[in-house]
């Protein structure tokens, strides 16, 4: 089956939202499931402090990663509400803060990352 990029992203959003627990962001769900970009898990605490400098200024350098991550999650959840976005990835694509969200991936990368959604015959078109 052929999907437009928007149709494919819609499927991806549905998958991520359905797998996201009430107390986590879609970034955390991706990390927990080991799919897509692996969410916040791909960054060290130093990298997270660099990606979220305004939050990093609010806490001591020795703040444990998990504590700093709580601030990031609160921020990302708030941004998701402000933008009325279905996923954290959508917020990142809008704000380009922390990462580029879905904008970071081309069509083939999206397809390769979600074999549970797409089969070998599926194609994502219209970049």
Image (spheres, grey):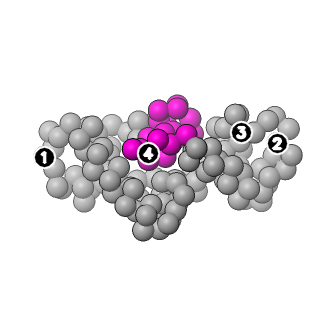
**Mark 4 or 3: the one toward you:** 4
Q: What's drawn in magenta, residue-wise?
A: 19-38
Residue 46 in sight from this viewpoint = no
Residue at the spot of label 3:
117
Measure the C-alpha gap from mark 1 to mark 2: 48 Å
Residue at image x 70%, y 34%? Answer: 115
Coordinates of residue 61 in the picture (x, y in percent): 15, 43
Task: Name the secondary structure under disc 3.
Answer: loop
Residue 73 locus on image (x, y percent): 35, 49
Tell me the mark number nearer the camera, choosing from 1 and 4.
Answer: 4
Residue denoted by label 4: 22
Residue that label 2 marks? 122
Taking 73 as reference, is 36 left or right?
right
Q: Is mark 3 in CB contact (under 8 Å) with mark 1?
A: no
Distance between mark 1 and mark 4 Cα atoms:
28 Å
Q: Residue furthest front?
A: 22
- Disc number for residue 95: none
| Residue receiving disc 1 | 60
* Nearer-the-camera pick, 113 or 66: 66
What distance separates the C-alpha of mark 2 from that of mark 4? 31 Å
Residues at circles 1 and 4 in contact by the CB criterion of under 8 Å: no
At horizontal 56% and vertical 47% (from top left) the residue drawn is 17
């Amino acid at each position: 089956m052929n999907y437009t990029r928007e149709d494919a992203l819609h499927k991806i959003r549905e998958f991520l939202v359905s797998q996201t627990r009430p107390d986590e962001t879609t970034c955390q769900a991706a990390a927990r499931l080991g799919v897509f970009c692996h969410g916040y898990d791909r960054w060290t605490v130093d990298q997270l402090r660099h990606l979220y400098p305004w939050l990093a200024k609010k806490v001591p350098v020795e703040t444990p990663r998990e504590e700093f991550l709580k601030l990031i999650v609160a921020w990302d959840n708030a941004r998701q509400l402000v933008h009325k976005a279905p996923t954290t990835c959508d917020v990142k694509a809008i704000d380009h803060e922390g990462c580029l969200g879905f904008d970071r991936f081309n069509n083939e990368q999206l397809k390769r990352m979600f074999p549970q959604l797409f089969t070998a015959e599926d194609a994502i078109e219209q970049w």
